[in-house]
Amino acid sequence: MSLFVYHQNQLYVEQVPVTHLAERFGTPCYVYSRASLENNWRAFDDAFGSHPHRICYSVKALSNIAILDLLAKMGSGFDVVSQGEWERVLVAGGAPHKIVFSGVGKTCSEIEHALEVGIACFNIESLDELARLETIAAKRGAIAPFAIRVNPHIHPPETHPGLITALKESKFGVPCDEAWKLLKRAQGNPHLKLCGLACHIGSQITELAPFLEAFDKIIRLADKAEKEGIHLEHLDCGGGVGVSYQKENVFSPAFYVETLLKKLSPRPYTIVLEPGRRVAASCGILLTRVEYLKTTTAHRFAVVDAGMNDFIRPALYSAWHDIIEVVRSSARKRAHYDIVGPVCESTDCFGKNRLLSIREGDLLAILSVGAYGFTMSSNYNSRRRPPEILVDGKKIYEIRAREEWNDLWAKERMTVPGF
Ligand SMILES: *Cc1c(COP(=O)(O)O)cnc(C)c1O
């Protein structure tokens, strides 16, 4: 069920007309539906039934503390890739013992701090990182919980090259044979506690096969470990579950989990999933207003007030996002437009050749921008980052205000003090 629907040709988010939000908060503006976010998260959680599991929402997809708070209240864990991300989780009331920490570049200071906070698990991506973790844990007299992030060397066929993380040449994880060496090395170490195996093969993957192939590989490794008396608690299948941006056929979390559990049976491991995109993408839209309709000999452009600094996926990944009128009118003629922003880059384009009936001043909504939308925004061209609004039924929350002009240079200093 979509929570973004038209009533009498007016787009609504849950029970709030979008035009009302644009008037109150201005444009560009991110708008999220609480019900959509929660439904998306629950689809993963419910799928497990009574099998032990943890859904560790991937914070980098959408990291506003109001969003993290809602997820924490539902019992979500969190997958983080930097100290900034777990600081957000803790501020939002998330539990440290449900945090898993991934990433190839964990610094000494991050490791120290994560041990102090008491996170659930370090997902280790190299031998040197494991050695570093051990040294720091030993110095603190601590026991560091860790899983080994395996790189299963899988090439998901259809996703964008920038979203693949499990190729032989990827920087992520360690190959299966090396993972085995790490397992052996940690065995009996008083400062390391092996908890499990992890993998994360990429993002926006719309076929099930690559996930199953990766899962097979970590199951085989777990079986081998078990035979040698190395006991694991969990298997972490990462995130990466794709969404339907342009009518892609996608599988449901229920079917995904059911298939994983069939493969797993009768092994008792807790399953960890780290979905980001599939939880957050469809819950958000970006509102923008048409500034100009500009016609050149080659093209018809709609110049809008959102730019690639606000939403970079089309420019960065050639991503396709649906763009729709906030108020539909059958009376007006439709035409094809390239929807472009004001930023001084030719890649500042949200969609090409889109059939729309629009005039100057009309509102457009760019759909499915909840994941990797606001979190990838910047101040490029000295543009203020847009506000984020959360709608819950009839209720409206401004969960992040539009930046002020002086936020743009708040951390900057003139060379001459007092100048
Ligand atoms: C980015 C990331 C995720 C989330 O990926 P999605 O495609 O958004 O589900 C999960 N785990 C790790 C380690 C990641 O880096």
Image: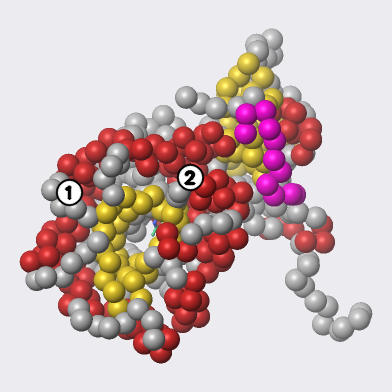
Magenta stretch encompasses residue 266: no
Q: Is residue 28 visible?
A: no
Reply above or below: 6 against 27: above
Q: Which residue is mark 1?
A: 264
Give the quarter of the image for residue 135: bottom left
Look at 51% across and 39% down and name the residue there. 37
Task: Name the quarter showing ligand 1.
Answer: bottom left
Where is residue 321 drawn, in percent x and y? Answer: 52, 36
Where is residue 128 drawn, in percent x and y? Answer: 32, 81
Residue sticking out furthest to the left:
227
Look at 61% across and 49% down and name the residue there. 66
Look at 82% across and 61% down and name the residue there. 406
* Front-lying residue, 244 or 111: 111
* Front-lying residue, 351 or 233: 233
Q: Which mark is residue 158?
A: none
**Mark 1 nearby-residue class (10 Å; few <14, some 14–19, many ≥20):** some
Look at 21% across and 44% down and name the residue there. 261
Q: Which residue is mark 2?
A: 74
Report the quarter where the C terminus lies.
bottom right
Q: Earlier in the sequence, mark 2 or mark 1?
A: 2
Secondary structure under the numbered disc 1 in the rendered image: helix
Q: Amino acid at mark 2?
A: Met
* Front-lying residue, 61 or 88: 88
Residue numbers of the magenta segment: 392-402
Q: Amino acid at mark 1?
A: Leu
Q: CA distance from mark 2 to mark 1?
A: 26 Å
